[in-house]
Image (spheres, rainbow, N blue to C red):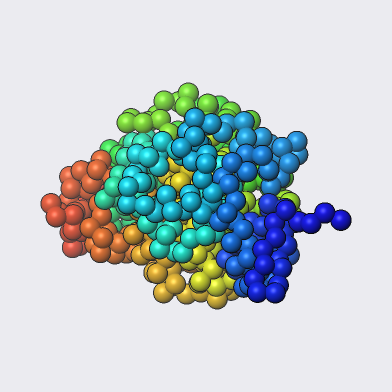
Amino acid sequence: MPSSPYTHTIGSKAFQFSDLKDLLAKASPLKSGDCLAGVAAESEAQRVAARFLLADLPLADFLNDTVIPYEEDEVTRLIMDTHDADAFAPLSSMTVGEFRDWLLAYDTTAKELSRVSPGITPEMAAAVSKLMRNQDLILTAHKIETITRFRSTIGLKGHLSSRLQPNHPTDDPKGIVAAIIDGLLNGIGDAVIGINPVTDDIPGTSELLILLDDIRRRYHMPVQSCILTHVTNTLAIIEQKGPVDIVFQSIAGTEGANTGFGITLALLQEARDAALSLKRGTIGNQVMYFETGQGSALSADAHHGVDQQTLEARTYAVARQYDPLLVNTVVGFIGPEYLYDGTQIIRAGLEDHFCGKLLGLPMGCDICYTNHAQADQNDMDNLLTLLGAAGVNFIMGVPGADDVMLNYQSTSFHDTNYLRQVMGLKCAPEFESWLKAMGIIDDKQRLVSNAAPPRLLSYLKEI
């Protein structure tokens, strides 16, 4: 019987790994989801052995060995068919370990990272992340600037944007508008004003879109709105000439998991083309908003024995195909079955942000957890601060950090302001000008105490 192509000995113990996906899984930091899937390392010694082997693996091997067969999965086909060999050329002689050293080098600049990004496959990004400490993930991601535009400019160095998430348990217009006004008065909403609807159908979604578009137009806000409904609903609303700014969809890293979401790559392209045809952007035309999260393929029983972090990185290959405005890893939302505690959630958030940025995406993070996870708001404060240092493009703004519709814990309006104050960050420049004109912030970027422009408050009385 032939020996494994991946064998490493520590002391008298020889560790063997059956193939590339087994090696990647065993090299991963501990995640409860990988334990659930039966792919996690059985010991720290096995994990170290896998990392030794991974460090010496040539990056070029990832172009010849797929973790999910090309013939079986359209995400694999997308990754291989769109690979940019010219962009990969500067990295082609490197091992995974050498790639890590190059990413961390003083001389490796944002321009160089941008130049090679189309040549990096998701599996390469996942592999190098498995050799990195948290600070390595932060340092590399911090170098990268990914800028997107629709009505506001998101991702500039020295800036932090936020999604205003005014969810309501009954989609009550007054409750939604009250949350929007509260967020605006806290300088929140420059990434997107996005609602998760309770009534996820075309009539209900259309009503919410009209509400958001009316308040935006009335107060000349340089923001974009989005209802986080299924892409097929959004397509139907576009056909009805509804006021769609941004198309939302949850996506995953395997064809099977995307089938579970009710989508194909062709459907995503159709939705992007439809949104572009509306020409609603004023300073840019990036019209897609994707949400992701480690564990989604496993929860759909479509993981193919691949570890959840590698599958998450493959999700970013799907996202970058459609030039999105926003990509948001909803890091702790699925639950402790996949990320058990604060330590695992923090690690996953940094991994996702790093891999997404490395692949050229405008990464944000819903820094969150469910109430049955072994995590608390202090863990979220830690991840929030670490992602701020890493240069995250945007975070969530949820009233009180407690989403009363989705029943999970996220980040509040105050959390965005905390990070802006501590790290000297600004909101999007167009939004900043609007906030000043409305008297919500002063010339030093500080929120004006008790700022409540009568024009904004009067809108509540009209609903």
Judge by depth and name the residue closer to the eye, 318 or 285: 318
Count of numbered circles on the image: 0
Q: Residue at x 53, y 51 (%)?
A: 96
Q: Where does residue 114 sit, x and y in percent of width and height?
A: 40, 39
Q: Where does residue 217 sit, x and y in percent of width and height?
A: 32, 36
Q: Residue at x 39, y 58 (%)?
A: 138
Q: Residue at x 54, y 68 (%)?
A: 344
| Residue furthest out toward the top | 277
Q: Tell me which corner region of the image, top left, top right, bottom left or bottom right, holds residue 14.
A: bottom right
User: Does residue 396 appear in the picture of this structure?
Assistant: no
| Residue furthest out toward the front | 12
Judge by depth and name the residue closer to the eye, 427 or 14: 14
Q: Identify whether 420 is placed above or below 221.
A: below
From the viewer's perspective, is 74 left or right of 293? Answer: right
Q: Residue at x 63, y 65 (%)?
A: 49
From the viewer's perspective, is 215 left or right of 120? Answer: left
Q: Tell me which corner region of the image, top left, top right, bottom left or bottom right, holds residue 18.
A: bottom right
Q: Where does residue 201 sit, x and y in percent of width and height?
A: 60, 43
| Residue furthest out toward the left | 443
